Image (cartoon, helix red, strand yellow):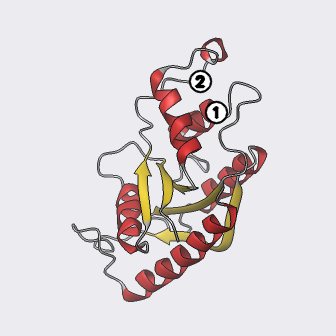
Amino acid sequence: MSQLNIAVFVGSLRAASINLRLARALEKLVPEGVAFQYASLGDVPLYNQDHEMDLPAPAATIKQLVADADGLLFVTPEHNRSIPAALKNAIDWGSRPWGQNSWTGKAGGIVGASPSAAGTGMAQQHLRNILAAEGVNIFTVPEVFLQYKEGLIDDDYQITNEGTRQFLQGWLEGYVAWVNKFKN
């Protein structure tokens, strides 16, 4: 198997984001030959159609990251029962201009963590709808609605609960197989 490049989109902009912790923990669990490349969403200006023919550099960087990726991993919190604005903004830029949608045909996976027992279920459903409209092939089973509790991921990004680690390891194995199925 050749190197798989996974573009990772963490929806939270917070430095202490639990979803960034989750992404870093997942990165430690991926098999050899899989590399994560993290998107920077905080410096992407709000989408404005007036600028889509001359993309702002941060938006162009997002489009290139997606173009170069074999797979897409979305690690998102839930903001007001939906996805964070920064994540939606990146998706909007990546889909434009018309006829140059960077998302189409890519293999994607969605996970998320929240202190809530419901995890990020509503945000993930909204994200699935958005990504389906953009032509992303989403890995759907099993879903990962992780309830985050203090200490679940230590300072070295190791998952401390064995059952959770095994579940996420299994999810990653399925996700990597999914990405390989759609790899160009």
| Image position, residue 56 (x, y; %) | 50, 19
State the SS at label 1: helix
Q: Mark number for residue 92? A: 1
Q: Residue furthest front?
A: 2
Residue under the image location 58 percent in, 14 percent down: 54
The quadrant of the picture occupied by the C terminus is bottom right
> Residue 145 sits in which quadrant?
bottom right
User: Residue 123 location in percent, x, y?
Assistant: 61, 54
Image check: 79 left or right of 40? right
Instruction: Name the residue: 39% across, 74% down.
Output: 29
Do residues under tags 1 and 2 come within 8 Å of each other at their CB atoms? yes
Dot 2 amino acid type: Tyr
Residue 24 picture location, percent across and down: 35, 62
Q: Earlier in the sequence, mark 1 or mark 2?
A: 2
User: What residue appears at the point 45 percent right and 37 percent down from the top-left corner?
Assistant: 41
**Up/down of 107 relative to 14, above or below:** below
Q: Which residue is mark 2?
A: 47
Query: Which quadrant of the structure image shows residue 67?
Result: top right
Residue 117 visible in rendering:
no
